[in-house]
Amino acid sequence: MTTSVSIKDLSLNFGNVKVLESLDLEVAQGEFIVLLGPSGCGKSTLLNCIAGLLDVSDGQIFISGKNVTWDEPKDRGIGMVFQSYALYPQMTVEKNLSFGLRVARMPKEEVEARVKRAAEILQIEPLLQRKPVELSGGQRQRVAIGRALVRDVDVFLFDEPLSNLDAKLRNDLRIEIKRLHQRLKNTMIYVTHDQIEAMTLADRIAIMKNGVIQQLADPHTIYNKPTNLFVAGFIGSPSMNFLKGDLNGGTINVSGTPIPLTNYAFEQQLNGAAVLGVRPEHVAIGDEARKMPFQVESEIEIVEPMGADTVAWTKLGGQQLTFRAAAEVHLEPGQKVLIGFDPARGSVFNAETGNRI
Amino acid sequence: MTTEAISSRLPTGAIDTSGPRGPRPKSVTIGRIGVYAFLILSALFFLLPLWVMVVTSLKTMPEIREGHLFNWPALLTFDPWLKAWDTACTGRDCNGLKPGFWNSVKITALSVPVSIVIAMINGYALSFWRYKGSELLFGILIFGAFVPYQVVIYPLIIGMRELGLFATLPGIVIVHTIFGMPILTLLYRNFFASLPIELFKAGRVDGAGFWGIFFRIMLPMSVPITIVAVILQTTGIWNDFLFGTVFAGRENMPMTVQLNNIVTTTTGIREYNVNMAATILTAAVPLVVYFISGKWFVRGIAAGAVKG
Amino acid sequence: MTQIAEPGERAAPGFAGTAAGRKPRTRRKFNIQSILGTTPMIATAIGVFVICIIFSIIWSFTSSKLFPNFNFVGLSQYERLWRTDRWIISVQNVFVYGVLSMIVGMVFGYLLAVFMDQRIRQEDLFRSIFLYPFAMSLVVTGLVWQWMFDPNLGIQSAVRQLGWTSFEFAPLVKQETALYGLVLGGLWNGVGVTMAIMLAGLRGVDAEIWKAAKVDGIPTWKTYLFIVLPMMKGAIATAFILSATGVVRVFDIVIAMTQGGPGVSTQMPAIYVIQHITDRANVGQGMAAATMMLVPVMVIISLQYLFQWNAKRKAART
């Protein structure tokens, strides 16, 4: 596997503000990488640096093995899709797609062939003579993707491309982008704050906070083995339960309730303040709970029926615990139920550093 | 850089890290120099008349007659300023610009609040209390913003004369109120229309009526837009020439009219230094408003784009 | 009618747009307080902008001299008007003045805005310098430039004193060039505003458009010309309306700078009207000229409505 995009020791400062700090990232050829994080985490900034739209303060950027740190965006072999679509409003779709190529003085037949191919892939042929104002949001974003497509480049950059669309369109276009990636097998770097988009699209997700990549891994690992409290809390909805307690000899004492962490794959030894993270969907109730290594009786406080399932709020050792139950299970506030989970499936963090242990 | 640099595509782990690193080297390009050259030359074009005005007003007449328009005065004198203010002649009167200044102060001080209060009520009524025909009236008013003044000026003179207002202070105040109304009303209407309607509804629920909502809710909220309106009107009315000539009459002749008379109708020798001092004095008030108000001024002209 | 754009906003809705586009707030057939409160507006709209214009038009068909009368003489005032060289020259002058100052003003204003947009140092200082003349009266503008153009003591003599003895720059003394002197003075006063409006328009363009153009490899000047400029219709319309209304009304600056001279070379319709209703005591003739001044305004307004109607039709089709 060859490296498509390689970022080495990248830093970016705006005045005294450090936006990115000695960041390294290797993206393999044909890989779909999602940069995920809350707003202000530097994910879009990183993408703009890769595109050459922002000048870096230090470090290097390689695309297809070529050092492009000082290159103009157009010479980097990238195509980019923006949140606001950024279509040229007075030009028809066809002109939008071909303008860059014509400015680069590409032969007319070649331009036509590329526009035709892009329009075909994205199924926008009937729209070619329309202007952007006459298109719906979804159609506009297709054209914007087309503009990246005609450039015939190795690397596609997406900057929150679906954020301006409503929920339904967002789902449709998400599938389409996935299909596009499977068909073209280009390298794609995709910025979003939407974890569903990240989980569904990515080969690997890079979760960012304060200009630093917290964890770079495939969605499964990110979900099941979050590297620190931030990642654990950011991914998953409803978010992971954090039970604070004292870790001593493989047992965590959560406000008087000891939970033995049998079979948990510790990465390092620790005795002291720790946090046990349990996903709401890993908590079982009733008969299922009986099969779990850890069981406890608890009282339901709030019930939120979601349709597909039900989220219930309860307490464990005085600390908030939510869990997901099947929709058929009837729950009521005040009801006492037996809940249970397998601590081995959970995550244990050092309470001081927030890192996984 | 050694032999590795020859190959541009390298497998993982073998990337040549000796190439460009960090920020793009900044070089002073020709384009950059061109940008500044263009801006500085343009700035000179805009500043030159101001410079000439100032230096001319500080020179003695003999020095002016030597030419050298742009030079700083060899012999600095403030007499032209005193003369322009106090004793310069228009026809037989030799009282300088000061009566004109005070006339302009009177006209501006009265016209600005009157025109703004009326426009504020108009904008409020047009946003929240429309009645049958109110939109048509507004349409006519906006049409009035584009009508050349000459089309309405004569019938207005006749009308004012019939009412005994021609060539009086109230007369000129009314004229400024009339011609300021289209743009100010538009300004306030757009402002009130941008407020949440819930504000108005809450007032209604609390039992307030037309004036109650106006004074207790809308008036306190319209401070920012009123600053814009005050700037717009103060400079506009101070700088007016046409209405001053036609409607103010001799008694209330504003500064601009008097300035023009001093400069263009002096008998005998033309005293350029006095003329320029008078010009600066006339421009001083709006210039001060401009420099104090800064960005508000820009907002004002953009909002008042149709005023011209 | 026009686009009134707050700086920084994208194309703001036009007058008609705001009126039609917003849902009605409260609408009552009669609200006494509201009608009372807007009495001055009613009086102005009806009394001034309807009745006065009607009277102007009526008197243009009469033989009114010093005082208005109602002796109707048909179109003879108009016939006389269009036989008068002074008027025809006035119309030509305002046309030349308008086209020149609008084209040069728009181009220069846009250029200034583009150069101001290059992340320059001291932007506020440059903006203040370009804009301050607009704060001053057109009378002041006219008088300053009259002095600058003085053939014996102005720019011309100053440059000659530097050694370039054949230098000629005194446009106001020659009939052929006086109008251009006027244009220059007018531009000095008004270009800053065009710049400010255009700059606000530039800044209102989506930053991602710029990024897209960079990724597409479109050179900066092409982006400004082919992508950004067409996106600034609102700002351009605002600047256009602003200068157009100024042109039709052009009066103060001419009076201060040239008084219409030399000869009739800088006569303007506005001056023609004022002179006929004052010194020349020929109200009928003045009103005929005034009525003619209304024509271009009406044309622009109808064009605007036509465009709006066309746009609506287009929007309805898709």
Image (cartoon, coloured by chain):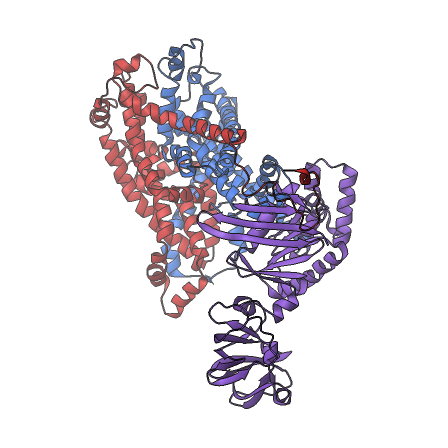
Instruction: Tell me, yes or no, if residue C60 can be seen here.
Output: no
Q: How many marks?
A: 0
For the colour purple, the matching chain is: A
Compare residues C79 and A247 and report the one nearer the observer.
Answer: A247
Q: Colour of chain B?
A: red
Query: Is A221 displayed left or right of C200 in the figure?
Result: right
Residue B238: give x, y in percent of width and height. 32, 37
Residue A41 versus residue C14 in the image, above or below: below
Q: Nearer the viewer, residue B169 or C117?
A: C117
Residue A355 placement (x, y as % from top left) = 52, 68
Is C108 in front, or is B286? C108
- Chain C shade: blue
**Residue A296: % across, % down:** 55, 88
C154 w.r.t. B13: above or below? above
Residue at x 68% of width, y 46% of height = A65
Q: Nearer the viewer, residue A312 or B57?
A: A312
